[in-house]
Image (cartoon, rainbow, N blue to C red):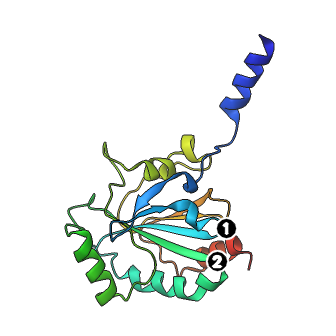
């Protein structure tokens, strides 16, 4: 009986064992993608929207991806229409917008919900310390970013108004990359 009690206590206080690798998503073309395909990479997950005041961040996010992709960084864009209808288009329209307006080459995924009762399980994991073992970071607006280590665990959340060009963000990404 004592060993069952100790095991229960250990499980309650054990760090989260789930990672982003436990999730399967649909890419912007509707194909299934396992996030386990990104094992060993540093991942920057961003909820994006085409009609947001933060939309110009695509430019700097794409530049960061281009600069660090050969060093192990991948950016994953997740369109979401949770904030004032700022991502109303279909996946096809979103893809066209991102590639023509901002020349996005990083992987984009099918539109999901990042908050509310229909929140996608990936975002439940990213935003809840009880699931990710690191931080509570509810999504407050478009272009909130989550930095994920090479082990698939959340490192930190970066605010929606914070550019990836900010020195603290660059430092955190480079640290995760081992640079």
Q: Secondary structure under badge 2? A: loop
Q: Choose top left, top right, bottom left or bottom right for residue 141.
A: bottom left
Q: Secondary structure under badge 1? A: loop
Q: Choose top left, top right, bottom left or bottom right for residue 107.
A: bottom left
Dot 2 and dot 1 residues touching (CB under 8 Å): yes
The vertical placement of 160 against 129, above or below, is below
Q: Earlier in the sequence, mark 2 or mark 1?
A: 1
Q: Position of residue 18 (x, y in %)?
A: 60, 47
The vertical placement of 50 against 148, above or below, is below
Q: CA distance from mark 2 to mark 1?
A: 8 Å
The vertical placement of 77 against 118, above or below, is below
Furthest residue toward front:
31
Q: Residue at x 30, y 70 (%)?
A: 49
Q: Position of residue 135 (x, y in %)?
A: 57, 50
Mark 1 is surrounded, within 10 Å at the Cα level, by few (under 14), some (14 to 19) or many (20 or more) other residues, namely few
Q: Position of residue 143 (x, y in %)?
A: 40, 69
Is residue 51 visible in the rendered image? The answer is no
Is residue 78 visible in the rendered image? The answer is yes
Task: Please give the residue where the numbered disc 2 appears in the rendered image.
Answer: 72
Q: Quadrant of the N terminus?
A: top right
Residue 40: mark:
1
């Amino acid at each position: 009986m004592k060993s069952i009690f100790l095991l229960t206590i250990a499980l309650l206080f054990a760090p989260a064992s789930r990672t982003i690798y436990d999730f399967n998503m649909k890419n912007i073309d509707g194909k299934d993608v396992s996030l386990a395909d990104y094992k060993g990479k540093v991942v920057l997950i961003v909820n994006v929207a085409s009609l947001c005041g933060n939309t110009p961040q695509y430019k700097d996010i794409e530049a960061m991806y281009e600069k660090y992709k050969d060093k192990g960084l991948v950016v994953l864009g997740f369109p979401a229409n949770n904030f004032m209808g700022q991502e109303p288009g279909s996946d096809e329209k979103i893809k066209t917008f991102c590639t023509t307006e901002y020349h996005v080459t990083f992987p984009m995924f099918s539109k999901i919900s990042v908050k509310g009762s229909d929140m996608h399980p990936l975002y439940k994991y990213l935003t809840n310390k009880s699931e990710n073992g690191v931080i509570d970071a509810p999504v407050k607006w478009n272009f909130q970013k989550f930095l994920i280590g090479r082990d698939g665990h959340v490192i930190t959340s970066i605010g929606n108004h914070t550019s990836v060009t900010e020195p603290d963000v660059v430092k955190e990404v480079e640290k995760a990359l081992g640079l």
